Amino acid sequence: MTTPESEPHWERQLLEKWALAALQEQKAKRRWGIFFKLLGLSYLVAVLVLLVDWGGPEKLADGSRHTAVVQLNGVIEASGEASAQTINQALQSAFGDKGTAGVILQVNSPGGSPVQAGIVHDEIRRLRSKHPQISLYVVVEDLCASGGYYVAVAADKIFVDKASIIGSIGVLMDGFGFTGTMEKLGVERRLLVAGVNKGFLDPFSPQDVTQKDHAQVLLGEIHKQFIEVVRRGRGERLKETPDMFSGLMWTGSQSVQLGLADGLGTVGSVARDVIKADKIVDFTIKDNLAERLAKRLRAGGTPGVASLLGISQPLLR
């Protein structure tokens, strides 16, 4: 009977078999590794295809007569999708397209920065003057408050739903005071300034009456500007009441009665019945993945002016 030990070079043959088996197993693992890497890469590519904006409105507008729509959604702020730069660029494209019969600014916003809202407002007035043959209408969805309404009054007409919320013509600057909490915790505030008011409205120090009065003057000035913009934009349509500029809000139906809006309507009905162009082309600029990441980094990594000053910023909300 022959045994492995009796065969010549049996040790070498056994080692070769082990090595071959190990090599085959390693190749199999490598193939599966490559498969899963390719699968992960394919998934990443698919996600990027969905997230990245591969084409703007210029690919949708073929020159035929249409209603151009620009959406203003969310808080109006420099680092968001409803920034003045983004909205104005979309409006410029909408007005500049040769097939645009009219423009609809679709608003659903609680407000935001008075500066950003003012820039959009002024650009709307400029574009209307530059393109007198093209009217711009605002169509409100759920909410058009404060800075959103600041923008809206630049339109030729404002259309709402009967249950929309309109108004909030006012300005706020909010914050917190922690002095009592610090005393209970035994925390001492050590603030060094060069300039008696450099610690303006510091939340960790007792409220200074003089600084509070100065902040109220600032808010009053911005509020005055807001009121003037509303009066200029709405003109004789506005039926002023004692509460109109107090920061209160109204339903869409009430806003029509007060002259804050012109009538009930949707994007579809305004395009069809007012502009007389059923075809709708959306000119809204939506940030691609890289742009969204860049804005988040800017917003998260670079403090705003208000943060640098240690105060909250006036807001049209």
Image (cartoon, rainbow, N blue to C red):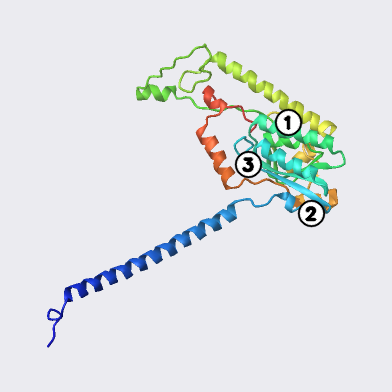
Q: Residues within 10 Å of mark 1 (few under 14, many from 20)?
A: some
Residue, far bottom: 1
Q: CA distance from mark 1 to mark 3?
A: 29 Å
Q: Judge whether 25 appears above or below 55 on screen.
A: below
Q: CA distance from mark 3 to mark 2?
A: 26 Å
> Which quadrant holds residue 248?
top right
* Residue at image coords 36%, 65%: 29
| Secondary structure category for the residue under label 1 | loop
**Which amino acid, by three-letter code, is at mark 3?**
Glu
In the image, is 293 to the left or to the right of 2? right
- Location of the C terminus (image quadrant): top right
Q: Judge whether 102 appears above or below 308 on screen.
A: below
| Secondary structure category for the residue under label 2 | loop
If you read the primary sequence from the N terminus, does the residue marked by circle 3 or circle 2 appear first? 2
Q: Judge whether 30 appears above or below 234 on screen.
A: below
The numbered mark at residue 267 is none
Where residue 309 appears, x then y in whole percent? 53, 22
Quick check: can you spot residue 85? yes
Where residue 222 appears, x then y in whole percent? 68, 24
Residue carrying label 2: 62
The numbered mark at residue 244 is 1
If you read the primary sequence from the N terminus, does the residue marked by circle 1 or circle 2 appear first? 2
**Which amino acid, by three-letter code, is at mark 1?**
Met
If you read the primary sequence from the N terminus, does the residue marked by circle 1 or circle 3 appear first? 3
Viewer-nearest residue: 192 or 317: 192
